[in-house]
Image: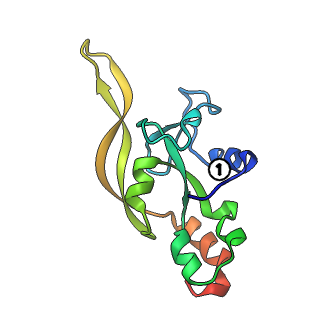
Amino acid sequence: MAQFTDELINKIWEKGRKDPKYHPDFVRKDACGAWIIKGKYNDRDSIYGWEVDHIYPESKLKELGVPQELIDNIANLRPLNWKNNVSKSVDYPHYQAKMKADVVNDSEGKAEDFNVECADEKEINANVQHRIEELFKGYRL
């Protein structure tokens, strides 16, 4: 697993989707719609844990001879719930999400937001794909 500076981790966190119900310094959603909590970075014991995802997979870029500095460019990084990151693995641009946020009624019938298991098919946004192609244009993706 790559080591990132606190400064870069904060920049990656900023790429998570804000939700008006929660303070963006603490809670966001990943690209699959799963809740992530900033303090749960690299915490696989939490359903709100998250990791840094290489949008275009790091292993595939290494095979192409791309330098690590370019592989770890902020344009190729995003926060992803750890279960979604494991499920995505080396898939690009199509992958499967394993976790998403959903409203669940508790025992008293009160609606609460939770992460729930899923098997949703996802695709990297076309604009992001274009930025990735530009970033690695000399490497025949």
Residue placed most toward the observer, 109 or 62:
62
The residue furthest top is 108
Query: Label 1, on which residue?
Result: 12
Residue at horizontal 53 percent and vertical 26 percent from the top: 21
Q: Position of residue 81 (x, y in %)?
A: 46, 46
Label 1 packing within 10 angstroms: few (<14), some (14-19), many (20+): many
In the displayed structure, 119 sits above or below 76; it is above
Colouring: rainbow
Residue 16: percent from left, percent from top: 58, 45
Q: Secondary structure at mark 1?
A: helix
The quadrant of the picture occupied by the N terminus is bottom right
Q: Position of residue 136 (x, y in %)?
A: 65, 78
Residue type highlighted by circle 1: Ile
At 30% from the left edge and 43% from the top edge, which residue is drawn? Answer: 117
Quarter-wise, where is residue 27 in the image?
Answer: top right
Please indicate whether residue 141 sits to the left or right of residue 120 in the image: right
